Amino acid sequence: MKNSAATFLSEDEKRLVTEAVHRAEKKSSGEIVPMIVSRSYSYPLATHLGALLLGMLTSLILTPPLSGVLQAESSSYLLFCGFFISAYFLFTLIIPRTQRLHRFFITEGDIEDEVREGAITAFFMEQLYKTKQENGVLLYISVFERKVWVLGDAGVNAVIDENYWNDVVSELVANIRIGKRCQGICRAVDSIGESLAAHFPIKEDNVDELHNLIIRD
């Protein structure tokens, strides 16, 4: 898939992001985990809604010409049902594989909710809540939804204002939109690293507790 997490960054870019995380974590006891996922949810309701509407439209377009040839009301009804059922099942296969078409049937509210839930789930699945000083930060990028979410643990949120995270997200999204994916992630990591260093300075016994880059295709 063109816009999957696996192809979001090249191998060299993945290395550069990992190095950026290493640099940031040398200044702080905090943990930064960039995570790239292909999508946060499958949105089955949007698939079926799209298939329903497109199946109906296909049937309305195809039925009149053929029913005119057959010249029978019963034939028109059967043709409509046949076209609709066939088109419906065909579109249930096509829509999930066509990102722009699939997104068309998903509301921004649903996207926002699912990305937030995906980030929260990932935060706990990857055990970012288990750092000694509660200073783990998840930088969550969901490719299909084109959304970025940043989650900090309790210790981080106690000292860093939420508006700061909004600024990090806005800058990263802007960079991704103009094709500067790697640069944007590295800048976000550097910025988060500086903020963590101000509140959680490095310690002699500091260890790298978490992954430095996670890809979930």
Image: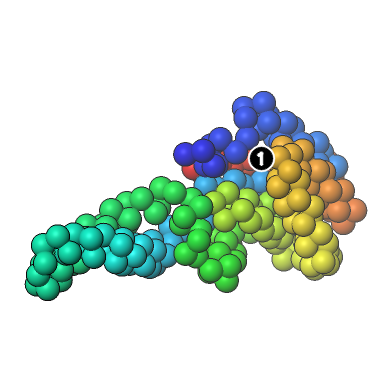
Vertical order, 76 against 131 (above or below): below
In the displayed orientation, state which residue is furthest to the right: 198
Q: Quadrant of residue 208?
A: top right
Residue positioned 20% across, 66% down in the render? 80
Instruction: Work out whether residue 38 or residue 194 is closer to the camera in this orientation and state it.
Output: 38
Q: Is residue 167 above or below residue 209?
A: below
Q: Left or right: 150 with respect to 26?
A: left
Residue 124 visible within the image: no
- Residue picked out by circle 1: 212
Q: What colour scheme does the image use?
A: rainbow
Placement of 18 over or under 85, stated as above or below = above
Query: Residue 44: percent from the left, percent from the top?
Result: 38, 62
Left or right of residue 139: residue 91? left
Residue ID at (79%, 52%): 171
Query: Amino acid type of disc 1?
Result: Asn
Q: In this rendering, is residue 175 above or below 168? A: above
Residue 3 in the figure: left or right of residue 45:
right
Q: Give the x, y percent position of residue 167.
A: 81, 59
* Res 49 visible: yes
Q: Secondary structure at mark 1?
A: loop
Which picture quadrant has residue 48? bottom left
Residue at 14 percent across and 60 percent down: it is: 69
Q: In the displayed image of the protein, which residue is found farthest to the bottom?
A: 73
Q: Residue at x 32, y 51 (%)?
A: 93
Observer-nearest of 215 and 58: 58
**Is disc 1 surrounded by few (<14), some (14 to 19) or many (20+) residues within 10 Å?**
some
Q: Position of residue 17 (x, y in %)?
A: 71, 36
What percent of the width, then of the height, locates residue 214?
Answer: 59, 42
Q: Quarter-wise, where is residue 24 in the image?
A: top right
